[in-house]
């Protein structure tokens, strides 16, 4: 037997090259579409993660606001005079507390109890200023009026009348 050692003809080489190029183009197109699908899926997951992060942040803001509201308002189920004095951090104060009026106001479906109160009594000027500063900065009461007069004794004794508003919610 005799073998012919001719090799590949020029047209066969062109056809083989063309088929190889087309095959490589198809494979690269397929790989590109897979990569594009993965990129789209990654973008979708990032958007989902951003939405969840936003929901968590919104929930944290809501929880913080609710805790602040809980701290600033009275519990109407436990609104005795002692509870009010504790809420205002005045249970050891020389000032006496009196509720002048109590009204119920509905705001967006939430019942808010509004108490007008009067704190009065005699103490040193420094104690009175400290109490006024505490009431103003704690934001647990809205002060509407404060009147200072000379006290009965002499020295730095001062008589004070403080009027303000307290807000309460049914926290059950």
Image: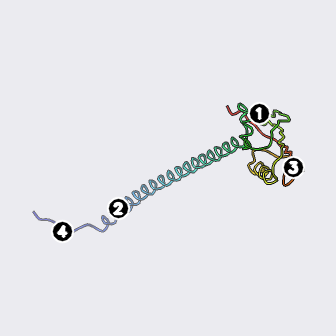
Camera-nearest label, 3 or 4: 3
In the picture of the structure, the residue carrying the numbered disc 4 is 5
Find out whether the residues at labels 2 and 1 contact each other: C-beta distance under 8 Å. Answer: no
Q: Could you say whether the residue bearing mark 2 is in a helix, strand or loop? A: helix
Residue 71 position, x and y percent, is 69, 43
Relative placement, left or right, of 67 versus 44 is right
Name the front one of labels 1 and 3: 3
- Please give the residue where the numbered disc 1 appears in the rendered image: 111
Q: CA distance from mark 4 to mark 1?
A: 102 Å
Q: What residue is pinned by disc 2?
A: 20
Q: Quadrant of the N terminus?
A: bottom left
Q: Earlier in the sequence, mark 4 or mark 1?
A: 4
The residue tagged with tag 4: helix, strand or loop? loop
Relative side of 48 to 101, left or right: left
Q: Residue at x 34, y 65 (%)?
A: 17
Residue 18 percent across, percent down from the top left: 37, 63
Reading the image, the residue beneath label 3 is: 153
Q: Nearer the viewer, mark 4 or mark 1?
A: 1
């Amino acid at each position: 037997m005799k073998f012919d050692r001719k090799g590949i003809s020029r047209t066969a080489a062109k056809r083989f090259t063309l088929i190889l190029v087309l095959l490589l183009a198809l494979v690269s197109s397929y790989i590109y579409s897979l990569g594009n699908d993965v990129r789209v899926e990654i973008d979708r997951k990032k958007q989902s993660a951003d939405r969840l992060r936003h929901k968590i942040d919104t929930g944290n803001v809501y929880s913080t606001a609710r805790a602040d509201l809980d701290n600033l308002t009275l519990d109407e189920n436990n609104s005795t005079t002692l509870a009010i004095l504790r809420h205002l951090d005045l249970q050891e104060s020389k000032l006496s507390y009196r509720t002048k009026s109590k009204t119920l106001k509905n705001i967006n479906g939430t019942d808010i109890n509004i108490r007008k109160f009067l704190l009065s009594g005699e103490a040193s000027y420094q104690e009175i200023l400290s109490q006024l500063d505490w009431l103003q900065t704690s934001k647990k009461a809205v002060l509407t009026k404060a009147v200072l007069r000379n006290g009965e004794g002499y020295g730095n004794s001062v008589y004070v009348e403080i009027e303000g508003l307290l807000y309460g919610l049914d926290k059950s």
